[in-house]
Image (spheres, rainbow, N blue to C red):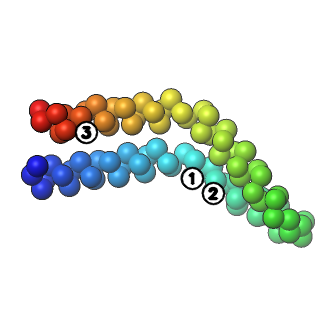
Amino acid sequence: MNEVVFFDTLRHGLWVAVVISAPMLGVALIAGLSVGLVQALTSVQEMTLTFVPKIIAMLAVFWVSMSFMSGMLVEFFQAGIIPLVAGN
């Protein structure tokens, strides 16, 4: 395998990982900031108050974007990885 092909495939794989993880990380950031703001305004410092809404929001986004994530991974493997393994 050529170095150029290896690094291009690695770069594309990292980009796919960033795009796939962006919705969940964005929702975790927004949920964490909003719960933190509510905690700061109300002076309630409960650990489960930050954990539970963030997990629920992330599970909801994961459920909604599952088809997008799996489709992007399948496309990456069919167009990029499998031809390299097969030698085409």
Which residue position holds label 1? Answer: 25
Please rate how many residues cluster around mark 1, counting C-alpha atoms within 10 Å: few if below 14, some from 14 to 19, many from 20.
Answer: some
Distance (Cα) linking label 2 and label 1: 6 Å
Q: In terms of secondary structure, where does tag 1 sit? A: helix
Q: Nearer the viewer, mark 1 or mark 3?
A: 3
User: Does label 1 or label 3 sit earlier along the sequence?
Assistant: 1
Depth check: give the residue in front, 22 or 66: 66
Q: What residue type is labelled 3?
A: Ile
Distance (Cα) linking label 2 and label 3: 32 Å
Q: Whole-percent x and y of residue 35?
A: 77, 58
Q: Nearer the viewer, mark 2 or mark 3?
A: 3
Depth check: give the residue in front, 42 or 83: 83
User: Does label 2 or label 3 sit earlier along the sequence?
Assistant: 2
Q: Residue at x 45, y 33 (%)?
A: 70
Q: Whole-percent x and y of residue 82?
A: 24, 34
Q: Which amino acid does label 2 sit on?
A: Leu
> Are the residues flagged by discs 2 and 3 in contact, CB closer than 8 Å?
no
Q: Is residue 23 visible?
A: yes
Q: In which quarter of the view is residue 33 placed?
A: bottom right
